[in-house]
């Protein structure tokens, strides 16, 4: 096979491989990265709650336009906690950007972007997670994790163990998909160089320097990868070139997918009920937040209680009168306009609403409400799930504003008494994001099934049906 024929053949092989990557590997990669990010976020929140690292005051202000690997070098031991705080906060933000905002598509990704994703996945070696690791960050995070297990309840230990297990599994699975993508981009790059530069070169002309010079004009803006140019020279001009080209074509060949055994029909309602359980698990986080903001309100309340306020409070207690409503002017971000908006918060009413919500969410976790929902139709369950996701999002927004209000209005001497809720808010966000993902999964699978039905194609997981019996005359 001469070079011209090889270029045509590998072009077709790459088209087929791109189609396979889009149909198969990218979906797996997205799901694995999503699980990876949620698992890391669970550990990160535990480190914050245990005060093993500090809250990053600049976390919400950082804007990400492209993936960047956080610092990996050795620590200045005198500033170890500070540096760990910055690195792990940055890592959390980068993973969030990768999963929720990055375009994981074949046309968008390239060799450089794959390298960045690999760097994030391998930033901490979750597959060989040990305080004895040669990786600085792996050692440091393994130490943090061991410290976080001290004096915690069984549930937290379970979360840590499950998170580490998922991080290890999704690291391996993600790296397998990234390897397949990397192969595609390497060979695509080499094909472009052949088509634009080397196809018309003789063996004597095809040197690194000549190819670099021609690329600068024929492929402006494209990077020069010495390793891949060396491969082109060997494959197209060396004695063993024919064998190398044949090997690459075999590697790129898409394996025929074996017909899979008929799966059981998808239990769509269970997907939604799993979302209900996930959103119900937010009750524990909301309970912790509730305790903290009540304590914080007491700090603010105590500083303004003078003699007459104390007398009024005593009279209310004697007469069993309802306590006066506390009204705060908080500031929320209007996400549609991108500007802050002030609104009045009736604190006691908000606390009452939050307590009711916690009770409802608690019953979702395999309690009475879960059993009741199990008996409802899919339409009723998804409506209930959507409503609760929106309500938790609204609570998250208001609680974040309350946290800012407390911090801005406390006196200097009382500042240490205010309990921050940023780690709890991160955990709360993870709950509704994960529940929302299950809702999206449900909708996507239902839509795919409906499209197949409209085309007259029975879904692969649909149970076969016997012909209906002919009705007998009455």
Image: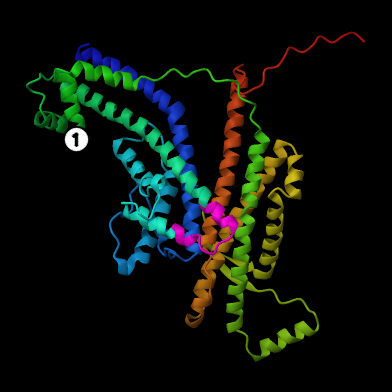
* Residue located 23% across and 20% down the image: 244
Q: Residue furthest bottom?
A: 307
Q: Is residue 243 magenta?
A: no
Name the quarter where the N terminus is drawn.
top left
Residue 394 seen in this snapshot? yes
SS at badge 1: loop
Q: Is residue 146 magenta?
A: yes
Mark 1 Cα shell of 10 Å, populated few (<14), some (14-19), many (≥20): some
Which one is in front, 326 or 229?
Answer: 229
Q: Give the vertical position of 159 relative to 404 (above or below).
A: above
Look at mark 1 in the image and give the residue it sits on. Answer: 224
Q: Give the vertical position of 256 relative to 230 (above or below).
A: above
**Percent from the top left, x then y, of residue 184?**
33, 28
The answer to which quarter of the image holds residue 98 is: top left
* Residue located 62% across and 21% down the image: 453
Which one is in front, 323 or 56?
Answer: 56
**Percent from the top left, x then y, of residue 63?**
38, 54
* Residue located 37% across and 23% down the image: 17
């Amino acid at each position: 096979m001469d070079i011209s024929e090889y270029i045509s053949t590998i072009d077709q092989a790459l088209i087929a491989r791109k189609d396979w990557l889009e149909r198969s590997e990218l979906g797996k990669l997205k799901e694995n990265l999503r699980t990876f990010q949620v698992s890391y976020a669970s550990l990160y929140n535990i480190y914050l709650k245990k005060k093993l690292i500090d809250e990053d005051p600049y976390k919400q202000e950082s804007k990400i336009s492209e993936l960047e690997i956080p610092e990996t070098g050795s620590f200045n031991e005198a500033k170890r906690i500070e540096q760990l705080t910055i690195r792990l906060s940055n890592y959390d933000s980068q993973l969030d950007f990768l999963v929720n905002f990055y375009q994981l598509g074949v046309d968008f990704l390239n060799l450089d972007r794959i390298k960045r994703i690999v760097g994030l996945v391998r930033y901490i070696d979750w597959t060989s997670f040990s305080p004895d690791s040669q990786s600085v960050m792996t050692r440091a995070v393994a130490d943090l994790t061991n410290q976080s297990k001290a004096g915690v309840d069984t549930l937290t230990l379970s979360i840590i163990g499950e998170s580490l297990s998922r991080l290890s599994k999704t690291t391996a699975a993600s790296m397998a998909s990234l390897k397949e993508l990397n192969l595609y981009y390497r060979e695509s790059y080499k094909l472009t160089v052949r088509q634009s530069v080397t196809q018309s070169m003789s063996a004597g002309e095809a040197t690194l320097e000549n190819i670099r010079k021609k690329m600068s004009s024929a492929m402006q803006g494209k990077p020069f990868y010495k390793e891949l140019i060396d491969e082109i020279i060997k494959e197209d001009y060396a004695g063993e070139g024919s064998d190398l080209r044949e090997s690459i074509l075999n590697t790129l060949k898409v394996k025929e997918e074996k017909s899979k055994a008929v799966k059981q029909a998808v239990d769509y309602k269970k997907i939604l009920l799993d979302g209900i359980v996930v959103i119900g698990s937010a009750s524990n986080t909301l309970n912790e937040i509730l305790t903290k903001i009540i304590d914080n309100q007491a700090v603010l309340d105590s500083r303004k209680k003078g003699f007459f306020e104390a007398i009024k409070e005593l009279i209310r207690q004697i007469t069993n009168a309802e306590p006066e409503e506390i009204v705060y002017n908080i500031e929320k971000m209007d996400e549609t306009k991108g500007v802050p908006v002030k609104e009045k918060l009736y604190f006691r009413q908000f606390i009452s609403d939050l307590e009711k919500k916690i009770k409802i969410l608690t019953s979702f976790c395999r309690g009475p409400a879960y059993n009741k929902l199990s008996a409802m139709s899919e339409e009723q369950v998804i409506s209930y799930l959507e409503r609760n996701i929106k309500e938790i999002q609204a609570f998250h927004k208001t609680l974040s504003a309350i946290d800012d209000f407390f911090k801005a209005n406390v006196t200097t001497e009382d500042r240490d008494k205010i309990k921050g809720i940023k780690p709890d808010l991160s955990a709360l966000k993870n709950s509704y994001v994960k529940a929302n993902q299950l809702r999206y999964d449900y909708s996507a699978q239902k839509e795919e099934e409906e499209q197949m039905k409209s085309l007259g194609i029975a879904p692969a997981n649909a149970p076969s049906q016997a012909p209906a019996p002919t009705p007998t005359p009455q």
